[in-house]
Image: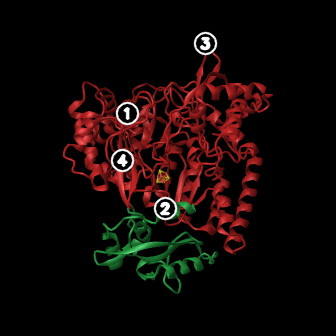
Chain colours: A green, B red
Amino acid sequence: MRHALTANRLSDGEVVFWSGADWVGAFAEARLYDSEAEARAAEAKARGEVTRVIDPYLIEVAAMAGRDAPVSFRERIRALGPSNRPDHGKQAQGGEAVRALALAEGAARSSGRTALIRRK
Amino acid sequence: MYRQDDIDAAFLADRTAEFRGQVMRRLAGELTEEQFKPLRLINGLYLQLHAYMLRIAIPYGTLNPTQLRTLARIARDYDRGYGHFTTRTNLQLHWIRLADAPDILDELAQVGLHAIQTSGNVVRNITADPYAGASADEIDDSRVWAEAIRQWSTLHPEFSYLPRKFKIAVTASPADRAATRIYDIGLRLYRDAEGELAFEVGVGGGLGRTPHLGATIRQRLPVRHLMSYLQAILRVYNLHGRRDNLHKARIKILVAQLGIEAFAREVDAEWEASDKAADLPLDELARIRAGFLPQGLTPLPAVSRRLEAAKADSRALARFARRNLAPHKVPGHAIVHISLKAIGATPGDCSAEQMETVASLAERYSQSEVRVAYDQNLILPHVRLDDVPEVFAGLEAAGLATPNIGLVSDIIACPGLDYCALANARAIPIAQEIARRFSDPVEAEAVGELKIKISGCINACGHHHVGHIGILGVDKKGEEFYQLTLGGSGGAPGEGEAAIGQILGPALPFARVAPAVGDLVAAYLAARQDGESFIDTVRRAGLAPFKAAVYADAHPL
Ligand code: SF4
């Protein structure tokens, strides 16, 4: 299972992903880690970035409908925005990557949420 | 309405200044998130899925037009032009920037609002009867007592670190419009045989993982002893409530474990030993009461010719008057419900423009009073029947005249997985889809009273346990599923005794929930006897016909 590193931005709580070089808003620009050890190392480093992000954690990513997408439904909502307000959140920008994420479904199994709850 | 004094104002200013310093230190990296999180939470600032959320307390759901306009302006200037009213009668702003939070709190303080005790293990916002001061059946204005409790419990040093959050509701009428049985403490005011005001005190109600209805621990508490008795309850809870297990920390668990009699004995022993110094001096009560004096409305003919003529001309107005008006204690007046459940809208959401419309209508037609009800709707409590056509027109122009109060599309839904970091599943789109299914107002009226309540997780902010149809979001391997319950009741007029709903059967996937509600309604229409509401039929017929309707052709899930 591949992973991406995500967090919320300190200044406004915006969902962000680690691109390998910086924190970015779009899941499509997230770095996907094949190696879990590398992903964990990135997560540990992100924990030191206390003035930029809150609660960095890894999410599972899988190919769905031919595109990479977060496995859990919760993470897809984070990557898109609230489904009752398509004009809010990242989905408002539209585009092919957003459409693909919105259509991704079916691969959800363990959501990684358990680890998140433990941290809360 | 109660107005804050100089001490309140100075305190709020100090508190915001302190928080501003904390935010700056956090942004500069001088505080870690671990250190900062409890500080932001005690100021009502949560982190949700997409942004920070500020939860603003609306004490006992009462607002004046200036406050509502301020909320509208804040929603526009600092958020995305809307706010979300919750089942705790609070307002949540879902898109807040950290650095803006102190400015928002300053603006709120200017109009006597704040976000203190909207989070944490403290006494939370006190809720009261949304009809307070307006209904004929009330014995007193429940807000007087709610305000007294608010003042007593705000930053109470002894109760600032309870085992868990603590919620108190007050009603002062035989009809329980404040759902007092589902609160940690539910206070029901009545006049005893000697004509004295007394409280029946219920304790240990609560929803969440282990739902309980509150049980009465004191049948007759003279009102002058309210504070010392609340203090005794909170002391017993503070001492014996569990702090080792989050899921067992609420007072309902303590009451269930000790048994109601033993718990009552502990409270009584504590109370009798106390010097009652916590009780409110009469002059202080009088000062608070002065903030809630009756409106001095002039009685008018019980039937308004003007309204009747307008209704004869407009079927929409006639339907609105049928569904959204409740009787007022002063003849010729009405309590007007404003539905925040337009078909397809997000339950409880209200745009800045809509808030401003309501503020103007309240100023002009409702003695400058607005109420927030726990069903996520608003209320104009004091409207002349003669003015209802204008009020209706104003609401209709703002998309606020949906005539569905108490009907199948008047759904309570928590923010769920669209916003909430704790959610398992979305609640809002389920509500939207059900409402669309019953968008025909004629059909919805024919179905009659039916309360659907949806929570996105077991924390039950959407009160699903007490929905006639309750819907609970669960997480099955990372996907959304929904468990349906039937036969719950908050104990409001027309829905009989408060009750916890029973689980109907296996959880359903997202796409099957709204059709299942359609099946439940069809089963009710087939089974109902003369004059029976949905909840009556469930109580008489039991779950069987409803189970059969939903799971008749179920394939294994
Ligand atoms: S019930 Fe759960 S999902 Fe809904 S608002 Fe409460 S905590 Fe969030």
Q: Is residue B408 left or right of residue B292?
A: left
User: Whole-percent x and y of residue B298?
Assistant: 53, 28
- Choose mark 4 or mark 2, whichever is in front: 2
- Choose mark 4 or mark 3, whichever is in front: 4
Q: Is residue B228 left or right of residue B358?
A: right
Q: Three-letter amino acid code at disc 4?
A: Gln
- The chain that hosts pointer 1 is B
| Residues at marks 4 and 2 on the same chain | no
Q: Residue furthest top?
A: B194
Splitting the image into 4 quarters, where does residue B281 fall? top right
Near mark 2 (Cα within 10 A), the count class, few <14, some 14-19 or many ≥20, is few
The kind of secondary structure element at disc 4 is strand
Q: Three-letter amino acid code at disc 3?
A: Ala
Q: Is residue B180 left or right of residue B317?
A: right
Question: In the rendered structure, are the residues bearing label 4 and label 1 in contact, judged by CB atoms less than 8 Å apart?
Answer: no
| Residues at marks 4 and 1 on the same chain | yes
- The chain that hosts pointer 2 is A
- The residue where tag 1 is placed is B306
Q: Three-letter amino acid code at disc 2?
A: Thr
Q: For this rendering, which residue is in front, B525 or B268?
A: B268
The kind of secondary structure element at disc 3 is loop
As measured in the structure, the alpha-carbon distance from the residue carrying label 4 to the one carrying label 3 is 46 Å
Q: Residue at x 58, y 22 (%)?
A: B190
Near mark 1 (Cα within 10 A), the count class, few <14, some 14-19 or many ≥20, is few
Res A45 visible: yes
As measured in the structure, the alpha-carbon distance from the residue carrying label 4 to the one carrying label 2 is 20 Å
- The residue where tag 2 is placed is A114
User: Disc 3 or 1, which lies upstream in sequence?
Assistant: 3
- Choose mark 4 or mark 1, whichever is in front: 4
Splitting the image into 4 quarters, where does residue B189 fall? top right
User: Disc 4 or 1, which lies upstream in sequence?
Assistant: 1
Q: Three-letter amino acid code at disc 1?
A: Arg
